[in-house]
Image (tube, grey):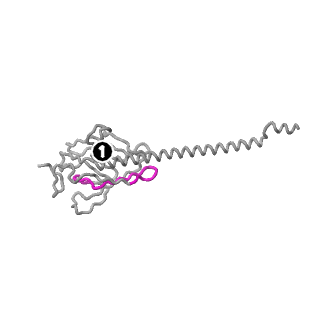
Amino acid sequence: MTRVAARARGFTLVELTIALVLMAAIAALLYGSLSLAARTWDGGEAKMQQVSDLRTTQTYLRAQIAAQYPQRLWKMTGLPLLFAGERDEIRYAAVLPSRVAEGGVYYFRVAVVPYGEHSRLVQERMVPDVSALEEPEFRDAERSVLAEGIAELRIGYFGRDPDAAETEAPTWRERWDDKQRLPLLVRIDVKPEKGAAWPTLVVEPRRSLEAGCPAWDPGRRICTRAS
């Protein structure tokens, strides 16, 4: 009777050790599950943010580039268009909605710039001096971040060489040198630092060859001042 009563009063050392081991295993499993859930949540939020950046940025750029303003520099020879296209950046004139800033025509630059250990897709803007004797530079320009964590921006331009005839077939190129005509199409590819590349964005500027020109010389295919 005495031995049975003593055993009923508590656990043996072996039983206690087994219980502690089981509790530790259960705690480890719970911690692993919570950690996995947290990583999954963070990954889901990051993916949602990436998709949001993608959609917002592509919608914005499509609307702006398609409706860009045919601003010319009135005191420069040939009245060149305020447009410049490189492989990794694009510059163009467009109207900025008054709800964003003071309304009017701005000169924009879209490019990828470093930010600490990462890079950003940014848009810079400035009010151009259309009476200047040289193309404006983006010094002290206002800057907006379009997307975070962008590794590469590649831009292509579909059109003809500056002196090419209309019968010549247009081709894709990595830069646009024609100061009299806009490209027929603009292609934008964005590669983020993580995840899949964005869907290719192809935009057609809705402007004619003579956009913003007071008088167009079809023979020389240049803009001239009205007589």
Residue on which the image places disc 1: 108
Q: Is residue 75 left or right of residue 89?
A: left
Residue 131 spot, x, y in % from top left: 19, 42
Q: Nearer the viewer, residue 57 or 138?
A: 57
Q: Nearer the viewer, residue 54 or 25?
A: 54
Q: Residues within 10 Å of mark 1 (few under 14, many from 20)?
A: many
Q: Who's the residue at 44% across and 49% down the image?
A: 193
Point out the residue furthest to the right here: 1
Residue 30 painted magenta: no
Task: Describe the element under mark 1 as helix, strand or loop.
Answer: strand
Residue 8 spot, x, y in % from top left: 81, 38
Q: Who's the residue at 52% across and 44% down the image?
A: 41
Residue 92 spot, x, y in % from top left: 28, 47
Disc 1 residue type?
Phe
Residue 82 spot, x, y in % from top left: 24, 47
Q: Which residues are magenta?
A: 177-199
Magenta portion: prevailing SS class:
loop
Residue 178 painted magenta: yes
Q: Who's the residue at 38% across and 42% down the image?
A: 145
